[in-house]
Image: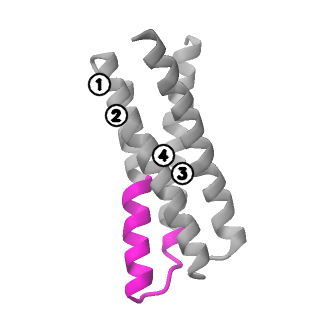
C-alpha cells in the first residue's frame, strides 16, 4: 500500500473513531432539552466528519474531493464548537470533553492542510 492509501485508511479509521467516541460521550448527557439538543448536534456533526471524509476518498474528481473534504473540515470545526459548548454548560467534564475537543481540532488541521495541498495541484 502506498503512502497516500495508508494516510486515507488512517484518516478513515481516525474520523470514524472520533464519531464513535462523540456518540458515546453524548449518552451521558442529561435527558433535558439542552442535553438532547447538544447530543443531537454533536452526533450529527461528528458522524458527518467521518461520512464526508470517506466520501472524499472515493470522489471522482479533484474538485469533488475538495468539496467533500471541505464539508468534513466544517463539521469537525462544528464538533469542536459543540464539545466546547457541552463543557461550558457542564454537560461533560474537562476530562471527558478535552480529548475529543483536541481530536476535533487536530482532524480539522490535518484536513485543512490536505485540502491546501490538493488545491495547489488543481
Quarter of the image that includes the N terminus: top right
Where does label 2 land, which residue? 68
- Residue at the (54%, 74%) spot, across then down: 86
Give the mark nearest the N terminus, 4 or 2. Answer: 4
Where does label 1 land, which residue? 64
Give the mark nearest the N terminus, 2 or 3. Answer: 3
Residue 45 horizontal side relative to residue 11, left or right: left
Q: Which region shows up in magenta?
A: 25-46
Quarter of the image that includes the C terminus: top left
In terms of secondary structure, where does tag 3 sit? helix
Task: Say if mark 2 contacts mark 1, CB within 8 Å.
Answer: yes
Q: CA distance from mark 4 to mark 2?
A: 15 Å
Residue at the bottom extreme, as displayed: 32
Q: Locate residue 52, reporting x and y percent.
A: 36, 39
Q: CA distance from mark 3 to mark 4?
A: 5 Å
Task: Say if mark 2 contacts mark 3, CB within 8 Å.
Answer: no
Give the mark nearest the N terminus, 4 or 1. Answer: 4
Q: Is residue 76 magenta?
A: no
Amino acid at each position: 500500500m502506498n503512502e497516500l492509501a495508508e494516510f486515507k485508511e488512517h484518516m478513515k479509521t481516525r474520523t470514524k473513531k472520533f464519531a464513535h467516541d462523540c456518540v458515546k460521550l453524548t449518552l451521558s448527557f442529561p435527558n433535558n432539552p439542552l442535553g438532547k439538543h447538544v447530543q443531537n448536534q454533536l452526533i450529527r456533526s461528528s458522524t458527518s466528519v467521518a461520512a464526508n471524509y470517506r466520501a472524499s476518498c472515493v470522489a471522482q474528481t479533484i474538485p469533488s474531493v475538495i468539496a467533500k473534504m471541505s464539508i468534513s473540515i466544517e463539521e469537525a470545526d462544528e464538533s469542536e464548537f459543540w464539545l466546547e459548548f457541552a463543557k461550558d454548560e457542564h454537560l461533560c467534564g474537562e476530562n471527558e470533553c478535552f480529548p475529543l475537543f483536541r481530536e476535533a481540532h487536530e482532524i480539522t488541521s490535518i484536513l485543512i492542510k490536505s485540502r491546501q495541498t490538493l488545491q495547489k495541484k488543481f
